[in-house]
Image (cartoon, helix red, strand yellow):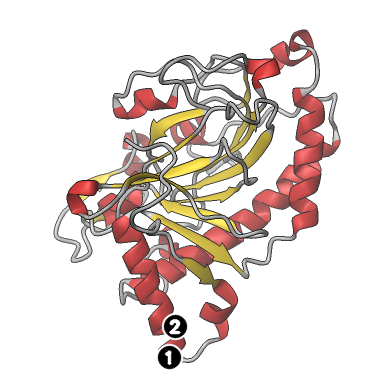
Amino acid sequence: MNDHPDAGPACPVPTVDLVRWRTGDAATRRGIAEAVDAGLRAAGFLVVTGHGIGQELRDRVRATARAFFALPAAEKQPYATEVGGRGWLGPGAEANGAAEGTATPPDMKESLSFASEEPTGVPAVDAEWFLPNVWPHQVPALRTDVQDLLAAMRALSDLLLELLAGALGAAPDRFTRHTAHPTWGFNINWYPGTETVGEALPGQFRIGPHTDFGTVTVLDRQHGKGGLQVWSDPARGGAGWQDAPYVPGSLTVNAGDLMARWTDGRWRSGRHRVLPPPPDAPSEELMSLVYFYECDPGTRIGSLADSHTYLRGQLTAINAQGGA
């Protein structure tokens, strides 16, 4: 696999202007829908502009989070959690490649992780999906800033799901009818330079190769040499690993496993990774804000024709109480 392709096919990730989608005429919207469908079939990724989430808010979240990551390890330790939990994931805590069965050394990052917390009133469901988040007292502004960003990310995610429904020629609420009380996750991923994480071991990444689990992931990333790469399958005309295109101010969106299942595999769950600090810029530091959107617990995920279904998660409790 070529980590730094400098020739060959262009990366099959289209740029989509959401303002044009919201305000365009039928022909404009049809062209956007076709581009979205093609991008999600090829690599499972889009770049979106006109999303309406201000840069100032994203900068505030990064600045406050950076103040937390700069704390001594002993001050961060009380917030330590395991993968899938809420709190601080310290160095060496995660190896994302394991999710797809790819053995890699631990990822070269630290994370602050948050998730859905507004309870449903069903104890078994709330204990699985809607627990309280952990907010470091050393950076009190983080809670307000993150909550403001989360509200914006959720609204954007529902707009994206309406766009995806349009790309399928389905009713606008094909997916959003199932996001009244959704589960979601949010990671602030800090990728420091080699002075903090050391030289990369063979096969080590800032984040190892994997796909996400949900419907759509909305990523606010910083451009860098040790940045995001996406996979398009050479067996299907793709070019393997390629650097993801970057448009200043944009957001990167990928489909997850849930969306791939929901569309019978028409759309790919976007496989991706983040390269280690580059040898020619070892002090490069990046930070990503990553929102993982899902759907309501108990949602039946079926084919486009609703010819088969399965229940998401361990939801016997909600079924017993008459949930959807």
Under circle 1, the secondary element is helix
The residue tagged 2 is 29
One can see residue 29 in this view: yes
Taking depth in this image into account, of 133 and 1 the one nearest to the observer is 1
Callout 2: few (<14), some (14-19), or many (20+) C-alpha neighbours within 10 Å? some
Left-right relation of 34 to 95: left
Image location (x, y in percent) of residue 212: 41, 40
Which residue occupies 43% across, 51% down? Answer: 295
Of 121 and 293, nearer the camera is 293
At which x and y percent is residue 166?
38, 75
Q: Is residue 259 above or below residue 141?
A: below
The foreground one among 5 and 162 is 5
Q: Which residue is drawn at 38% across and 52% down?
A: 7
Give the residue at the far left of this rendering: 307
Residue plotted at (59% across, 24% down): 109
Which residue is denoted by mark 1 in the rendering? 26
Query: What kind of residue is marked 2?
Result: Arg
Tell me if residue 23 comes above or below residue 134 in the rendering.
below
Question: Where is residue 34 shown, x and y percent of the image?
Answer: 35, 75
- Give the residue type at disc 1: Ala
